[in-house]
Amino acid sequence: MSAANGAGIADGVTVRASDALRAHHATIFAALLAAGLIAPFILYPVFLMKVMCFALFACAFNLLLGHGGLLSFGHAAYFGGASYICAHAAKAWGLTPELAILTGTAAAALLGVAIGSLAIRRQGIYFAMVTLAFAQMVYFISVQAPFTGGEDGIQAVPRGELFGLISLRSDLTLYFVVLAITLGGIIMIYRIVHSPFGQVLNAIRENEARAISLGYRVNGYKLAVFILSATFAGLAGATKAIVFQLASLTDVHWTMSGEVVLMTLIGGMGTVFGPIVGAAVIVTMQNHLATFGAWVTIMQGCIFVVCVLLFREGIVGGLARWMRRPL
């Protein structure tokens, strides 16, 4: 067999494996859609919407950490910042919910440009500390700015009417809008990860020096993935503001940045569906264990320690290894 024939066979096997993987993921997405359509008739819609908002938030963070290799301790800035802008736009400016969400998302993207252009100049723990410092600045602004309402936040945010036609006062109606936003956002992240841009990100994460030697503008890719991650995090935060009709300091507090790290690592960093599972686990714990008060955080810490010791790749990562199929 000639070398050319061997290379052709290898390429064919790779293509078939890639097609099989895409079909596998498409099946899982279809199952998620089917479950999402049935779920509000079985479980409380507001709880499900909270899970979906945090699932999108975790997927946005996973794009930065799991594929870009950049650990940010300040993602609450984009999640909470978009929440405040969206709430203010809907309540004070009278924008329809879709325009308010887009306004909050755009604000998060601009914030990502401003912070990312400075943060990417550092690496490792220094990068993480820079993002945390900027997030604390956003928190301070949220406390002091007149339009944020201080410790009370922005309350009674109107849900309004989608496109001026469909009333979102019903939890069930709003649920399907949030489902569309969440699945749309996650699929967009999936396409980014499995594009040539995503492959370059993985190469930079694995060996940055080699990527530089191949001629890639590493800082440009880092800034791009930082902005994309901030944008999707802002989309999640803005959607949450409409769901709960509230934007509060909790959304911009440093603990929110810690929670999204926890969700990503418990679910499985670098996996497609891991952040979704991690978000569902953490939100469910917070919901059902709320009566324990501050003990909830201790329980979360214990679960995190157990996952690190027993499932180093996270829940979905460990399941994928057991099934020998990427998830």
Image (tube, helix red, strand yellow):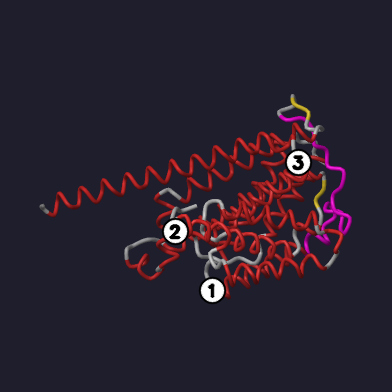
The secondary element bearing badge 3 is classed as loop
Residue 202: quadrant of the picture? bottom left
- Are the residues at dot 2 and dot 3 in contact (C-beta closer than 8 Å)? no
Give the residue type at disc 2: Leu
Pick the front one: 104 or 265: 265
Q: Determine if residue 311 is in view.
A: yes
Residue at point 77%, 30% (across, down): 161
Q: Which residues are magenta?
A: 140-162
**First in sequence: mark 2 or mark 3?**
3
| Separation (CA) of disc 3 from disc 1 | 41 Å
Q: Position of residue 266 (x, y in %)?
A: 62, 62
The residue furthest right is 152
**First in sequence: mark 2 or mark 1?**
1
Q: Residues within 10 Å of mark 1 (few under 14, many from 20)?
A: few
Q: Is residue 143 left or right of residue 164?
A: right
Pick the front one: 163 or 239: 239
Residue 80: quadrant of the picture? bottom right
Give the residue type at disc 1: Gly
From the image, tell me which residue sits under label 3. Answer: 43
From the image, tell me which residue sits under label 1. Answer: 124
Give the residue type at disc 3: Leu
Q: Is residue 183 above or below residue 227?
A: above
Does residue 157 show up magenta in the picture?
yes
The secondary element bearing badge 1 is classed as helix
- Are the residues at dot 3 and dot 1 in contact (C-beta closer than 8 Å)? no
Q: Is residue 258 left or right of residue 198?
A: right
| Separation (CA) of disc 2 from disc 1 | 16 Å
- Are the residues at dot 2 and dot 1 in contact (C-beta closer than 8 Å)? no
Residue at point 14%, 51% (across, down): 4
From the image, tell me which residue sits under label 2. Answer: 201
